[in-house]
């Protein structure tokens, strides 16, 4: 993970599938201040493409980074979304 | 030393005013284009378990994009918004090539319920939201779920039968208006 930003809040959507990771991400980022970074932790492999598509198609947010790893044998996908306005 | 004449002055002033007017018009157009909110209209006509999902998933996701979304429910699509019926939507075992059984067997009594129970189990295991959750989520995120007035009466439903927040008293003209302004229109 790049060290250029600080995580403001973490959203755990492990175990949820489409469209929940996107909808929950939107709901979690709305109340945050501009400049905040939301970490989204998902087990849905589709979230890699979906979070990117959502961030590209939505004003006021920027996808900083995505990573893929494992936690306790399960694949875990992490997304870092910055609220820019 | 000036070469300006009264006539030239007059022309300049008129040109400047015209340029200013055009510039402000362009600025307004740019502002409008930048603010343009995407719109989507879905017409949901089916009331089976599997057909309830696509409109609700697309609608709630589009709302997360900040789109203005209308889902116009008509005919069996009304059952998705019907508080009681939405909890008992069935997956049809007959005529479904994905079912691991021949149609003659699938047509036996109880097979639709069996197929639905199997699907519900898979949905739970997969962490997929229930239909009720998706309806609540859609309403919460500002999706306009509309129930066609003509089919409400045709099906002999009551406005009270639907989830709180569902729009009733609307017809084809309302749906068409929104469709004409929409970037995405889907019939499901």
Image (tube, rainbow, N blue to C red):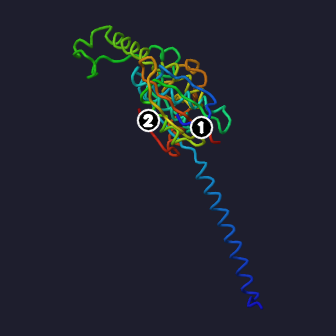
Looking at marks 2 and 1 on the same chain, the residue that comes earlier in the sequence is marked by 2
The residue tagged 1 is A82
The residue tagged 2 is A49
Label 1 element class: strand
Q: Chain of mark 2?
A: A
In the image shown, does B73 or B112 lie closer to the viewer?
B112
| Residue displayed at 53% across by 28% down | B147
Q: Position of residue B125 (x, y in %)?
A: 42, 14
In space, the residues marked 2 and 1 are separated at their CA atoms by: 17 Å
Label 2 element class: helix
- Which image quadrant for residue A83? top right
| Residue displayed at 68% across by 72% down | B18
* Horizontal arrangement in the rendering, residue B129 relative to residue B116 (left or right): right
Q: Position of residue B19 (x, y in %)?
A: 67, 71
* Horizontal arrangement in the rendering, residue B63 relative to residue B18 (left or right): left
Q: Nearer the viewer, mark 2 or mark 1?
A: 1
């Amino acid at each position: 993970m790049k060290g250029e930003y600080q995580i403001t809040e973490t959203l755990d959507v492990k175990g949820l599938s489409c469209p929940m990771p996107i909808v929950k991400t939107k709901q979690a980022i709305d109340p945050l201040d501009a400049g905040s970074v939301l970490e989204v932790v998902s087990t849905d492999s589709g979230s890699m493409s979906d979070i990117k598509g959502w961030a590209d198609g939505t004003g006021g947010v920027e996808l900083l980074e995505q990573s893929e790893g494992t936690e306790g044998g399960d694949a875990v996908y992490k997304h870092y979304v910055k609220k820019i306005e | 030393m000036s070469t300006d004449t009264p006539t030239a002055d007059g022309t300049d002033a008129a040109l400047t005013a015209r340029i200013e007017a055009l510039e402000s018009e362009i600025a307004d157009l740019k502002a409008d284009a930048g603010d343009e909110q995407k719109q989507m209209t879905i017409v949901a006509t089916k009331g089976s378990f599997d057909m309830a999902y696509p409109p609700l998933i697309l609608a709630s996701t589009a709302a997360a994009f900040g789109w203005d979304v209308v889902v116009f429910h008509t005919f069996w699509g009304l059952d998705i918004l019907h508080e009681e019926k939405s909890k008992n939507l069935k997956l049809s075992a007959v005529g479904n090539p994905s079912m691991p059984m021949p149609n003659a067997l699938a047509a036996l009594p109880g097979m639709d319920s069996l197929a639905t129970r199997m699907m519900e189990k898979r949905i739970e295991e997969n962490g997929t939201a229930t239909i009720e959750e998706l309806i609540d989520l859609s309403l919460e995120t500002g999706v306009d779920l509309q129930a066609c007035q003509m089919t409400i009466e045709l099906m002999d439903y009551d406005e009270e039968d639907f989830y709180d927040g569902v729009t009733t008293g609307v017809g084809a003209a309302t749906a068409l208006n929104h469709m004409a302004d929409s970037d995405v229109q889907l019939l499901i």
